Each structure stands twice: as structure tokens, then as C-alpha cells.
Image (cartoon, rainbow, N blue to C red):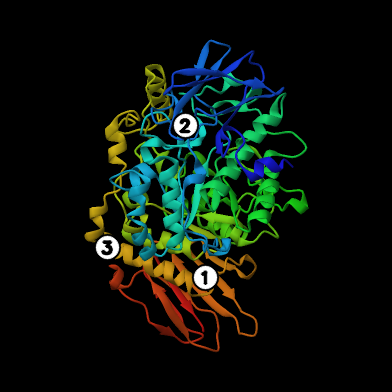
Amino acid sequence: MNQALIDRRTLGITFSDNGACVRVWAPLAQSVALHLYKQDVTIPLTNDGNYWQAQVSQLQPGDTYKFVLNDALERPDPASLAQPEGVHGPSQAVDTQSFVWTDTGWSNLPLEDYLLYELHTGTFTPEGTFAGIETRLDYLIELGINAIEIMPVAQFPGTRNWGYDGVFPYAVQHSYGGIAGLQRLVDTCHRKGLAVVLDVVYNHMGPEGNYFTDYGPYFTTRYQTPWGNSLNFDDDYSDSVRHYFIENVLMWFRDLHIDALRIDAAHAIHDARETHLLREIKQYVDELMQQTGRQHYLIVESDQNETRFIQPLANQGYGMDAQWNDEFHHALRVTAGGERSGYYADYNGIQHLAKAYKDAYVYDGTYMPRRARIVGKSTAGHAGRQFVVFSQNHDQIGNRMLGERPSQLVSLEMQKLMAGAVISSPYLPMLFMGEEWGELNPFLYFVSHSDTNLIEAVRQGRKKEFAAFQGPFEAPDAQDEQTFERSKLNWTRLSREPHQTLFRYYQTLLALRKHSSLRHPDRESVAVVVDEARQTLTLFRQHSEAGQSAETVVCLMNFSKEAQAFTLPISEKAWKKLLDSADPQWLGPIASPSEIAGNGSVTSQPESILIYTNT
């Protein structure tokens, strides 16, 4: 293990008492020089056999520069921390150690306590910046979440992008507030008791401003991804590529105090070496935590239902702490009356939702028709805290042609039921920005490229993707600024009905999650009863502290459009109501009894959830 990677950044520009250290990987270059824009001087770098480097006294924080390769190509720094003039402009030197942190008393939350809220910096607030997010932190605390998950912030072309087209993994999007703005946001979050999760992309690079191949073999033709050649994690020269991304992970944790990373599309990280990149990242993070005493988590997105990602290192797994579970979402959406085309065709609704409650994966070593093969592994032995579930996220909304949210597709009653289904699950619940008040603005796919050929390619690609869509609408133009503006949250809705009441309902649900057996993502105690004919599901949750009797919570979910009767389990104690989504206080039709005898029954209103406890 390379201790230097753990201690500090080694790539790009770093500062010490001896001035600026410059270091760049360009193994095939004949010469590399540093061009300082302010002084308009060019300083040759020396080659140590793999990296080009120099100690430079003229370079100060804030100065801009580029590297000159082979006396011909002038390129931004691949490990740049700032790109104030965009992806094609010069890099800017940043001293990350100059920020004065005030979060020394902060301790990361236990993973099982995470209540996540995914947001996109550019559309979450009118300002579209980190400073804008800061102004809404008290609101998020009032809502009841304790961890924000920020979509990727690595520098991308222009000012409008989901973030998955980033081409400078170390640089923080300048229009959002740059690296200093992100440091301030994290520091403020910690002061207010909020954890920060950052979405990062290690499976591909965006197309515009991607100058990596000018520096060296960052990519390999061994594998293809949906975005082109795979990053080179196992071919010739791959050691330095691996170190580049490992160092990036450590930078987020060490220098920006990020609490957890969400690693995008981990199944598209191709690596056939004996130690997979993710496993090596985990080893380095474990060592960093050992040395700093700070806790950090690694969460992956993967659609393979492959438990090796979340298997501990000791069991030859990759050691990731948790993963997004899209299958819970798919089963829930179909159960709630969503379409059954595309990848939803593999899910039959309420039976698969019941399986997701019990087993996390729906396909866990079973045949999946869409892929025409056996998919997945059993999740036996994996705790509930290892799975993140949701009724919506950026992908599931934004990959629809018109970017519709559930608030535009299902009734208010079904929205409340879906929220209850997620937050009562034995997994880590995640909300997507605005769902808590039933935001009606779409979340569309948007970009702001400057390459006209690329812009047209994106337009044609979107048209082709939705060519089979039968309707009067065309796919919105991702390049059009109005597509971005339409995707911004409309905060004024919070003061109107039914949005205000829905917000209070989410508050109540999240408070219930914190102060009942629902708090504990304990899969072992879960039981599920399904009535497919009536479209009802009964979820049993139970937890007991040492020396105390177990508290049983029963969640009665009625996904049908008719009232349905439920018989409660036999109990020595009466069942007391914790939540009723059909209560008039939540704009529902009628409230159910606040207390029911230990062997009684109750009628559930259409598209509703009832939660009772016997404590």
C-alpha cells in the first residue's frame, strides 16, 4: 500500500513550505512543461521514469496554468482542482489545506441511521449553487432527513449537466462554487448534524473536454461500456490509472471531509486483476480511517444483483458498505400501477415487492426474461443497512422522455402509500428532492455542450431512444436552457395545498422511522403476507433491545382502488395506530380506529397505508 496516497494528494499541484510541487503522469511523452499564464513562463518538468515533476517557486494558489506535451499540445491538468474558464480552459492551482474547518466535533452517523435525500445542485435551489443548498439545510433538518446525497460535481462542460459527463474528477464544478464552496457546504452540514454523500463516476469520462488520451493510456480497448472504451484498470500502464482514482477517493474523504461516496454504475468498472479496483479502494479507505479516526462509507450502484460488491474483504468481496437497490423501486412502481414495459416487464408487481422486502433482490439466482439468463445471488447474511431503497431517483425520473415524477403519474393517495412503503422498509430509505411536497416540475435530461456535433448527437440519440414512444410529444431538447429551467424545484408550492400537507406527512413518516422499530434495518425479523387478488401487503417489523420485550410494528398496505379488510395478528396487547395515510389530516377520506383489540380487524382505504404497534 502506498502511504503517500493516504497522507496527501500527489498529483497535480500541491503546496508546502517549499512552494508548489507539480506532478503529472504522461508515460509516453517525450517532454512535458508547465505553462504559467500569469507570468507567461514555461518551466520544463523532469521525468522520474513514470511521472513528470518539478518544484516551482513562482506558482501561487489562484494562478492558472496548463501542461505542454511534446512542445506542441497545451492541455489542462488531468488532476486539476479547478477549471474557472471551463473544461477547455486553463487549470487553476488550489491549496485545499487553506480552508479552516470547524467540524472537529463531528462524527459520521451509523450507516443504519442514514435517512438519505438525493439532490442536484443546479436544480435544487434557484441559485443552483452550494451556497444555495446551505440556505435550505434547516429546511432539510425540519423535514427529518440526516444525510444529503449530491449528484456528481466533477467539472463538466458548460453550466448545465446531470454531472455524469464530468471530465475532471478532481475539479469541483466552478459554477456551483468550486472546491471552496463544497468545503463550506460540508462544514456547515456537519455543524448542523447532516452527513454528506457525494456521487462519483469511475466507470467512464464525458466526451467534451476529455484530454486524458493526450497524457497516456487512461483507456483500454479490452472492454466497451455504454459510453465508449473502458477506463484502463487492468491493461498495460494500469497501475497509475488505478492510483489516480484511488487518490481521488481519498481526497474527497481526507481533504473535503465527505462522509460517503456513491459510486456510479460499479458494474461498468471492468477490472480482471486479482485485486479489483473497488476492493483496493476499500483497503485504502480502511487504512485512511485507521489513521484519521473518521468513519467513511462506500455505496455502489449496480444492476447485477451481485453480492460480491457488498461482501466483506475477509470473505473475498469488494467490501462496499451498501448498494442502491433498483429492484425494490421497480417492483414498487409496477405495484403502484406503473407501466410494465422496458425493464419493468421483468416485475410482476406485489409478489415481487414482497420478495424485495424479504430478500432485497427480486432476482437472486433466478431466470430474468429480459436478459434471458440466470441473474443475481442470494443476499442471505447481508444486513438491511446494505441496501438503499426509494420510490424515485434522478435516473428513474430523468430517463423518462418527459421526466415525469410520480406526482404526475399517480394519485396523492398512492404517493403517500409509496412513501410509506419505502420508509417502513428494512433498508435505508432515500428521497429525491421535491418528492416530499409532490413537486410537479419534471426532472429532465439536460446538457450545455459547446461542441455542435456533440449537441446534435445528443439530440439524435434522445430521439432514437424514445422513437417507440407513441404520443403527441417529442423528447425535450437536452441542450435547450429551458429544459434545465423546467427541471428546477418550485419552492413556492410548499405554501400551497396539497403540497404543504404532503410535506407534513413526510415529516411524520420520517419521525416515525426514527422513533419506532422501523429505525432498525433488521431483515431477519421481517415477515410479509401478500394477497395478490386484493392487492394488499402486510409487512411485519420487529426489534427488541436487550432486556426488553420486542416491539412489533405491522404495516398494512392496500394498493387497490377498493377498501380492503385486514385481520391483525393475535396480540395480548391492543394495537395502537402510529400512522394512517387516509386520515383527513393528510387529506384522506376517513381515519381508521386509533386502537384495535389484539385479535381485531381494520378496514384500509383505497391506496393507503396503516401502521400499528402493540407496545
In x, y percent, where is residue 116?
A: 47, 57
| Label ID, residue 165 | 2
**Residue that badge 3 annotates:** 500
Please say if 205 is above or below 199: above
Question: 10 Å neighbourhood of mark 2: few (<14), some, or many (≥20)?
Answer: many
Which of the 4 quarters of the picture holds residue 271?
A: top right
**Disc 2 residue type (three-letter):** Asp
Judged from the image, the secondary structure of the residue bearing numbered disc 1 is helix
Left or right of 400 in this view: 533: right
Which residue: 32% across, 73% down? Answer: 583
Indicate the secondary structure of the residue bearing disc 2. loop
Q: Nearer the viewer, mark 2 or mark 3?
A: 2
Observer-nearest residue: 50 or 62? 62
**Residue displayed at 60% across by 33% down:** 11
Residue at horizontal 70%, vertical 47%?
Answer: 283
**Residue that label 1 marks:** 518
